[in-house]
């Protein structure tokens, strides 16, 4: 009797998919939830796990063929009496006929529990996969949780625990990336991680079973079954003292033979090779930072090298390079003082130069949304010059007391944000949105704050910013920016903005023309603050030249809804509020 594997639903609006690659051939054994094929849609490329365990008897849709959701892709049988299955097994076992006998003889010593579910004539890989599936009987399934109102799927970017590791309640178990946020998923239960069902870089829907956590008894027996496998190679090693070396050399190839055992091979690597296993994220980061992994000591479970280890190694290498360069630079200065101009500020060559890498999920999402925003709106930018001297003086007086009272640094950004929110209430068109033939003027000001992170640009949202004072806005900015950079922000905090502010001046930019995010009508850019001479009117009404703190405010907007005059009036309102500098009550003066 055979079961039919169908094209699953891959999203709310996805109706068809293209088979890009079959990961199993006809006659091969397939485990439950083992990747069976790769499918590409107009929204995602993903692996399809097998919903059944057995033998792949027939492939109904060839590679590069496009079929609708629900179409039959293949047939998987029970494996009993299947000629193709027996032939495939005998062909695989032909090169090493003695290995199964060795493992069978060792089985009683390592625990006879595995002999019941597996026939005695099965090969070692089959016993291993049988042992791997055993924990699911007494373990609890860990599913991909809902990560936001509109989030339907997520990509596993990194497992923070390996098979066999103990997990506490609410301890981070894995990292997941969605189209809105990268976040850690905590374990809902305590126990031992018995089985990993979704590998890194795989994309699955909300509710998909990711792993199995149980009491730990089954997880301990799985590694025990693997131990006898290398003993099949002990025949080639005469001295018993060298047997452990033979195990180390042969364990990795044996573990890689069956594809279903790949997770266990990776999970066991830290304990056998001192943390040599690297996740794709760590490997990519090490490449970007130019860090030699062989010189890094892992601080993760079992000596695994984590992201923090790579960042620390990169920081130490940078400090060492600066320390080594300091004597060389100071020597000419001592012998010839006028030679200072020779110290050119040449930036270091990036390790990414001349390389090619796959775009991250977040980068692809940013790219798609920026292009979509430009294609769906008529965008342009208006710029005004603002004198922030009074705010600068007020800030200098109040920043120490403000920090002690509010617990946040008093930067210029909260002043701009408060003035922008107040102006939004007076000019609701800037805070509105045109959808089809209807214009919505929002009753609240949800302000997105653009945050630069190592992973890319993210925009957490200050909800109901119109109800906050300067201190409240300052605290919100610090909290959201910190948690966003630390990857602790929730997906719902990254959506729902009605207006956006981007502080391009933090990078030294004078003027920018930011792109208006989709679903909104405007974005305010704040340029860097510089001191320069300007003509002002003094207390006596005379025009004088004075040193002033100046910056530019840029407003990009959707011209389908907002006219140039609307933009100018809005910017002028902010300019007037900032130049007045009447924020004494807000800062406690």
Image (cartoon, rainbow, N blue to C red):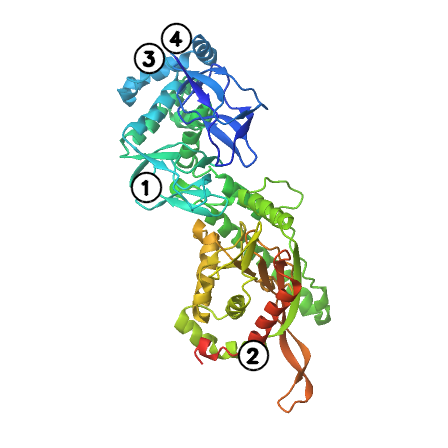
For the C terminus, give its image quadrant: bottom left
* Mark nearer the N terminus (1 vs 4): 4
Q: Nearer the viewer, mark 2 or mark 3?
A: 2
Q: CA distance from mark 2 to mark 3?
A: 87 Å
Label 1 – label 2 distance at C-alpha: 57 Å
Within 10 Å of the Cα at label 2, are there few (<14), some (14-19), or many (20+) other Cα atoms? few
Which residue in the protein does label 3 denote? 120
Nearest to the observer: residue 573 or residue 194 = 573
Task: Say which mark, if any, is on residue 580.
Answer: 2
Viewer-nearest residue: 315 or 398: 398
User: Disc 1 vs disc 3: which is toward the camera?
Assistant: 1
Count of marks overlaid on the render = 4
Image height of 130 relative to 399, above or below? above
- Distance CA(mark 1)–CA(mark 3): 34 Å
Relative side of 2 to 351, left or right? left
Q: Report the Cα–Cα distance between label 4 and label 2.
A: 87 Å
Determine whether 298 is above or below 15 in the image: below
Mark-to-mark CA distance, 1 and 4: 41 Å
As helix, strand or loop, the secondary structure at mark 1 comes to: strand
The image shows residue 61 at horizontal and vertical percentages of 54, 19
Q: For residue 167, which numbered disc appears in the image? A: 1
Tag 1 near tag 4, CB within 8 Å: no
How crowded pointer 1 is (Cα within 10 Å; few <14, some 14-19, many 20+) is rated as: many
Residue nearest the viewer, comparing 173 with 320: 173
Q: Quadrant of residue 41?
A: top right
Q: Earlier in the sequence, mark 2 or mark 3?
A: 3
Residue position marked by numbered label 4 in the rendering: 81
Residue 238, image x, y percentages: 41, 19
In whole angstroms, how far apart are the C-alphas of marks 3 and 4?
16 Å
Q: Residue at the location (70% across, 62% down)?
A: 344
Residue 27: where, in percent of width, then height? 47, 14
Could you tell me if residue 351 is visible in this image?
no
């Amino acid at each position: 009797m055979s079961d039919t594997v169908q094209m699953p639903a891959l999203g709310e609006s996805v109706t068809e998919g293209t088979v890009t690659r079959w990961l199993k051939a006809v006659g091969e054994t397939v485990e439950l939830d083992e990747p069976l094929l790769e499918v590409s849609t107009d929204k995602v490329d993903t692996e399809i796990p097998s919903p059944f365990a057995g033998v792949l008897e027939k492939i109904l849709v060839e590679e590069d063929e496009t079929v609708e959701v629900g179409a039959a892709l293949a047939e998987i049988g029970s494996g009993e009496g299947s000629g193709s299955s027996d032939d495939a097994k005998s062909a695989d076992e032909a090169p090493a006929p003695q290995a199964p006998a060795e493992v069978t003889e060792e089985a009683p010593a390592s625990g006879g529990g595995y002999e019941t579910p597996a026939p005695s004539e099965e090969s070692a890989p089959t016993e291993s996969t049988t042992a791997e599936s055993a924990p699911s009987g007494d373990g609890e399934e860990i599913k991909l949780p809902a990560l936001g109102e509109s989030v339907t799927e997520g990509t596993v970017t990194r497992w923070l625990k390996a098979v066999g590791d103990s997990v506490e309640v609410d301890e981070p178990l894995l990292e997941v990336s969605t189209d809105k946020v990268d976040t850690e998923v905590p374990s809902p239960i305590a126990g031992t991680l018995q089985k990993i069902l979704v590998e890194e870089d795989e994309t699955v829907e909300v509710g998909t079973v990711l792993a199995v956590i149980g009491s730990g008894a089954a997880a301990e027996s799985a590694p025990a079954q693997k131990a006898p496998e290398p003993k099949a190679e002990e025949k080639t090693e005469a001295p018993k003292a060298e047997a452990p070396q033979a195990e180390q050399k042969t364990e990795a190839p044996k573990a890689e033979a069956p594809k279903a055992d790949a997770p266990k091979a990776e999970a066991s690597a830290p304990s056998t090779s001192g943390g040599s296993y690297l996740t794709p994220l760590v490997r990519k980061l090490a490449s970007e930072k130019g860090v030699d992994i062989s010189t890094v000591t892992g601080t993760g479970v079992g000596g695994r090298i984590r992201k923090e280890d790579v960042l620390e190694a990169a920081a130490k290498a940078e400090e060492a390079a600066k320390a080594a360069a300091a004597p060389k630079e100071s020597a000419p200065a001592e012998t010839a003082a006028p030679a200072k101009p020779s110290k050119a500020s040449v930036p270091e060559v990036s390790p990414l130069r001349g390389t090619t890498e796959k775009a991250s999920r977040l980068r692809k999402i940013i790219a798609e949304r920026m292009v979509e925003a430009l294609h769906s709106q008529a965008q342009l930018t208006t710029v005004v010059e603002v004198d922030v001297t009074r705010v600068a003086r007020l800030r200098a007086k109040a920043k120490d007391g403000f920090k002690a009272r509010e617990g946040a640094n008093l930067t210029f950004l909260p002043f701009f944000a408060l003035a922008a929110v107040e102006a939004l209430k007076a000019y609701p068109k800037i805070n509105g949105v045109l959808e089809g033939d209807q214009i919505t003027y929002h009753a609240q000001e949800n302000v997105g704050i653009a945050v630069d992170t190592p992973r890319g640009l993210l925009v957490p949202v200050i909800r109901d910013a119109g109800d906050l004072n300067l201190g409240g806005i300052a605290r919100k900015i610090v909290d959201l920016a910190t948690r966003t950079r630390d990857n602790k922000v929730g997906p719902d905090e990254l959506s729902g903005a009605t207006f956006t502010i981007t502080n391009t001046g933090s990078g030294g930019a004078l003027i920018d023309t930011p792109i208006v995010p989709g679903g909104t009508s405007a974005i305010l850019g704040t340029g860097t603050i510089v001191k320069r001479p300007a003509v002002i009117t003094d207390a006596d009404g005379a025009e004088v030249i004075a040193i002033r703190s100046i910056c530019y405010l840029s407003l990009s907007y959707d011209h389908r809804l907002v006219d140039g005059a609307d933009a100018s009036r809005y910017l002028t309102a902010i300019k007037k509020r900032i130049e007045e500098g009447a924020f004494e009550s807000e800062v406690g003066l």
